[in-house]
Image: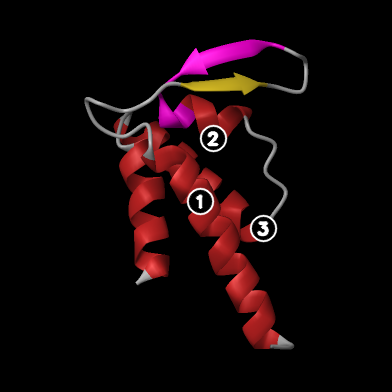
Amino acid sequence: LEGVQASTLRNIDAAKQLSTIASTSLGPNGMNKLVINHLGKIILTSDCATIVRELEIEHPAARMLSLASERQEGECGDGTNLAVTFAGELLGA
């Protein structure tokens, strides 16, 4: 694949990878994540907003999901994991 199709598939893949990272911490049986940020600070959390905030996301499509998560937290204060996971599932359909 070349051109627009290849870049579209890479964008979808990047968003789905971020969604996969976040989806395993969803729900009452969600797993904790160990995140080490660029300053070397160790964070153990299952909160998607914290996970996405501390990751160094460079890909534009995945960054858009990160921004959607931040806006969800800003507007409602919750539901960030649902926003990221749902977007990834929509892209996977």
Determine the CA span between mark 2 and mark 3.
Answer: 14 Å
In the picture provided, is 78 more to the left or to the right than 46? left
Q: Do tag 2 and tag 1 residues touch (Cβ < 8 Å)? A: yes
Helix, strand or loop at mark 2? helix
Label 1 Cα neighbours within 10 Å, binned few <14 / some 14-19 / many ≥20: many
Q: Residue at x 42, y 57 (%)?
A: 88
- Going from N to C along the chain, the mark reached first, 2 or 3, is 2
Helix, strand or loop at mark 3? helix
Magenta extent:
41-49
Q: Nearer the viewer, residue 78 or 87?
A: 87
Quadrant assignment, res 80: top left
Instruction: Look at label 1 and name its amino acid.
Output: Leu
- Going from N to C along the chain, the mark reached first, 2 or 1, is 2
Picture coordinates of residue 23, whole percent (x, y): 38, 42
Residue at image mark 1? 65
In the picture provided, is 51 more to the left or to the right than 24? right
Quadrant assignment, res 52: top right
In the picture provided, is 83 more to the left or to the right than 62? left
Residue at image mark 2? 52
